[in-house]
Amino acid sequence: MMWDVLTGFDPALLLAFIAAGLLLNITPGADFVFVSASGISGGPRVGMAAALGINLGIAVHVAMAAAGVSALILAFPWAYDAIRYLGAAYLVWLAVQAWRASGDLDEGRAAPNMWRAVRRGFLTNVLNPKTALFIFAFIPQFTDPVIGPIWMQILVLGVIFMVFGAAFSLCLGAAAGVFAQALRTKTKLLNRVSAVMFGGLAARLVWD
């Protein structure tokens, strides 16, 4: 059943989803800063532990989205459009924040050891309403009732989002110490590019 759902997605739409998910991960936000700072201050293992904790937190939000969003849509058909517009508004907010960001990495957010890095990364995501809002509002945009159960589509897309996000964040944590200075000097440019792409994605969600 899961395989049927996965193969039911339009390949172009699936690629757009993966690209948007990667864009979220490479945008220097709270997770990017935390993993980078942990790797810079504690070394590759601490950086990768921070990435693991973050993705465990994301798993909780994906599970909640699969259970809650599908039930909401079934109970209130208009909720799908509401979520779509909410997602677009949040993407616009992300675009504005990315454009205005200074580009500094705050090493003070780092965790001092592996266990604390995992725990802090997990709590950072579980208790972060921005992460929950993004997952609840973003992933359902790529679902289609024709393909299969909404909850299953959200679960499949959530796993894809986590796999690519974990791959990036683990690599980021491991490489942060080596490329610390490069990350600092390129962050502002990356913010601007991400802002434009988030704005374009928001427009697509509204007009499609």
Image (tube, grey):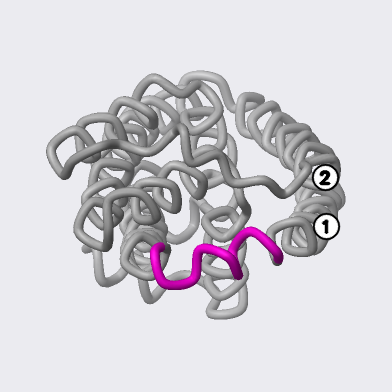
Tell which circle, 1 or 2, labels the residue nearer the N-terminal end.
1
Quadrant containing the C terminus in the rendered view: bottom right
Q: What residue appears at the point 56 percent right and 55 percent down from the top-left corner?
A: 142
Of residues 75 and 25, the one nearer the viewer is: 25
Q: What residue appears at the point 48 percent right and 41 percent down from the top-left corner?
A: 107
Residues packed near mark 1 inside 10 Å, few (<14), some (14 to 19) or many (20 plus): many
Give the image quarter of residue 93. top right
Magenta span includes 51: no
> Whole-percent x and y of residue 78?
66, 25
Residue that numbered label 2 is attached to: 206
Determine whether 179 is above or below 194 in the image: below
Residue that numbered label 1 is attached to: 192
Q: What residue appears at the point 38 percent right and 31 percent down from the top-left corner?
A: 125
Quadrant containing the N terminus in the rendered view: bottom left
Badge 2 element: helix
> Whole-percent x and y of residue 95?
79, 45
> Whole-percent x and y of residue 13?
60, 70
Of residues 52 and 15, the one nearer the viewer is: 52
**Foreground label between 1 and 2:** 1
Residues packed near mark 2 inside 10 Å, few (<14), some (14 to 19) or many (20 plus): some
Of residues 19 and 123, the one nearer the viewer is: 123
**Over which residues does the magenta segment extend?**
177-185
Q: Which residue is at the far left?
A: 115
Task: Name the kind of residue labelled 1 in the image.
Answer: Arg
Q: What residue appears at the point 59 percent right and 27 percent down from the top-left corner?
A: 77
Examine the residues drawn in magenta and state their main secondary structure. Answer: helix
Q: Is residue 4 left or right of residue 187?
A: left
> Whole-percent x and y of residue 195?
80, 53
Determine whether 97 is above or below 162 in the image: above
Tell me the tag on residue 46.
none
